[in-house]
């Protein structure tokens, strides 16, 4: 049985921004979530809206910190500035009736119909899909050679490489020494791409994150494993 949401209301707060209050028959308690950079307050059936507002007020400071860490993703538009490992993004309008893209000279040009409304979700979806296609292309073009050279330089061997669309991890290594790399790596600066690849290569010798593993990583990163690991946490494959 699927239960529908029975009430939803949006309010605006000068500090917290847009807040959605939602009554859900599935909820058993008052819950606050942050979704896409906005606060969602879930109220159980028969609950009290004011109680939820008080709950939000009690957690205002924590919510402000969380919103700063997880801001809403910026929408693609002609003003979007994005530099990836191998190309920059250029979105513009054109008289053509459909979207199209070209990747030339280190620039990904995405042309949009003249009347494109960048606020529409379907437009954002199209632009994201085009960007992802370019990221996958560049990952497949560049990462295999980088991985091969790093392996040769540091004496590693691996059985295979697969480019994935993972949004939960930058990379992984199987027990058979096959390495998986997310094409979202192309959104990282070069030194962090190299760190991820070295991290996975070290897993070909030590599968767990043991002290021996981190000693291996330190050995191939000039003792910078901890610093690079901390820096990588500022990014996410989503």
Image (cartoon, rainbow, N blue to C red):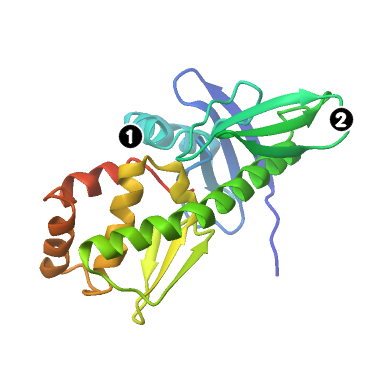
The picture places residue 105, in percent across and down from the top left corner, at 58, 33
Give percent across and percent down for residue 189: 37, 39
Closest to the camera, between mark 1 and mark 2, is 2
Task: Indicate the quadrant where residue 204 lies.
Answer: bottom left
Front one among 164 and 50: 164
Q: Residues within 10 Å of mark 2 (few under 14, many from 20)?
A: few
Please indicate whether residue 26 sits to the left or right of residue 32 in the image: right
Q: Is residue 208 toward the left or the right of residue 138 in the image?
A: left
Q: Mark 1 or mark 2: which comes first in sequence?
A: 1
Residue beneath the point at 70% across and 65% down: 2
Q: Position of residue 231 (x, y in %)?
A: 26, 42
| The N terminus, quarter of image | bottom right
Q: Which residue is label 2 attached to?
A: 96
Give the answer, above or below, for where 190 lies relative to 109.
below
Circle 1/circle 2 CB separation < 8 Å: no
Of residues 2 and 200, the one nearer the viewer is 200
Q: How many marks can you see?
A: 2
Report helix, strand or loop for mark 2.
loop
Outermost residue to the bottom: 176
Q: Which residue is pictured at 32% across the width and 29% down the height? A: 61
| Marks 1 and 2, how far apart at CA | 47 Å
Which residue position holds label 1?
A: 62
Specify whether residue 44 is in view. Answer: no
Q: Neighbour class for label 1 at 10 Å: few (<14), some, many (≥20)? A: few
């Amino acid at each position: 049985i699927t239960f529908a949401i029975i009430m939803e209301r949006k309010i605006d707060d000068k500090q917290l921004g847009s807040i959605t209050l939602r009554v859900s028959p599935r909820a058993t308690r008052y819950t606050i979530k942050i979704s896409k950079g906005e606060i969602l307050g879930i109220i159980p059936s028969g609950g009290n809206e004011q109680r939820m507002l008080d709950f939000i007020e009690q957690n205002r400071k924590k919510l402000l910190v969380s919103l700063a860490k997880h801001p809403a993703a910026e929408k693609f538009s002609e003003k979007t500035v994005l530099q990836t490992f191998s190309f920059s993004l250029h979105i513009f309008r054109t008289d053509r009736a459909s979207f199209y893209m070209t990747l030339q000279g280190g620039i990904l040009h995405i042309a949009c119909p003249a009347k494109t409304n960048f606020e529409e979700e379907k437009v954002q979806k199209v632009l994201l899909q085009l960007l992802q296609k370019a990221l996958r292309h560049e990952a497949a073009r560049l990462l295999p050679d980088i991985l091969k050279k790093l392996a040769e330089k540091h004496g590693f061997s691996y059985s295979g490489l697969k480019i994935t669309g993972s949004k939960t991890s930058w990379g992984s290594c199987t027990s058979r020494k096959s390495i998986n790399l997310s094409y979202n790596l192309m959104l990282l600066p070069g030194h962090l791409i190299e760190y991820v690849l070295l991290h996975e290569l070290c897993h070909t010798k030590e599968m767990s994150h043991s002290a021996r593993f981190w000693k291996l990583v330190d050995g191939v990163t000039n003792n910078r494993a901890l610093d690079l690991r901390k820096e990588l946490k500022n990014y996410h494959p989503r």
